Amino acid sequence: MSAAPTHPPIICTDDAWLLNVVDPPINIATIKEKMIDPYANTPAALWWSIGDHEIYHYETQIGRLAGAESPTIAANVHHLIDTCGGPLTALLDLCRNAGMQCFPRVRMNSHYDVEANAPGFGTLRQQHPKFLIGRPGNEYPAGSTEYGLRTGLDYALPQVRTYTKPPSSANCSTALIWKV
């Protein structure tokens, strides 16, 4: 009989806030100090957001990297890509060295109330509102679950799945890097 897998009793979520609050260029020592060191001697794993809507803040070849809508994030992401492979590579290395598991995650459908004309809303959502869970013309009470979900992409639609699909199976090798 094989031993049961061990799971961390605590999973700490992180929205990649540090990329937005540290003036560029961010460095690995700051990431370690602010994101890894606070969990020293804690049986925890890190659940780290790699993006929101279809705008990402890690080293990727799919979707769109943060840009004009988030200049601080964009500058920090590009600096980390140029100096160490990217924020995800840096964070995974730091977690591995600290003996901590790390689970990258993407918010496919964010609950944040972002105006449809804001650059951070995402091009697909702006150009094709018919691809949203909340169809054009539908009204939802502010603060309701439906209101929060209305700007989410409807993944039941093949056009949405095609848009968000990686361009080739070559990206599967990236998943191997994520294993800590």
Image (cartoon, rainbow, N blue to C red):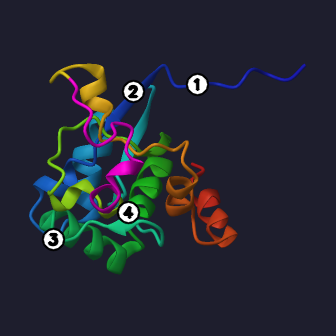
Provide the secondary structure element on which disc 3 rests: loop
Toward the viewer: 171 or 143?
A: 143
Amino acid bearing label 3:
Ala
Amino acid bearing label 4:
Tyr
Discs 1/2, front? 1
Residue carrying label 2: 42
How far apart marks 1 and 3 lie (CA) works out to 39 Å
Amino acid bearing label 1:
His
The image quadrant of residue 150 is: top left
The image quadrant of residue 70 is: bottom left
* Crowdedness near tag 2: few (<14), some (14–19) or many (≥20) residues, C-alpha within 10 Å: few
Q: Position of residue 140 (x, y in %)?
A: 22, 25
Whichever of labels 4 and 2 marks the residue nearer the N terminus, that label is 2
Circles 4, 3 touching at the beta carbon (< 8 Å): no
* Crowdedness near tag 4: few (<14), some (14–19) or many (≥20) residues, C-alpha within 10 Å: many
Provide the secondary structure element on which disc 1 rests: loop
Whichever of labels 1 and 4 marks the residue nearer the N terminus, that label is 1
Inspect the magenta stretch and tell me whether residue 132 lies in it: yes
Q: Is residue 176 left or right of residue 69?
A: right
How far apart marks 4 and 2 lie (CA) works out to 26 Å
Residue carrying label 1: 7
Which stretch did the figure color magenta?
A: 125-140
Q: Is residue 114 above or below residue 61?
A: above
Residue carrying label 3: 68
Whichever of labels 3 and 2 marks the residue nearer the N terminus, that label is 2
Q: Where, quadrant-wise, is the N terminus in this rendering?
A: top right
Whichever of labels 1 and 3 marks the residue nearer the N terminus, that label is 1
Circles 1, 4 touching at the beta carbon (< 8 Å): no
Q: Position of residue 4 (x, y in %)?
A: 74, 20
Discs 4/3, front? 3
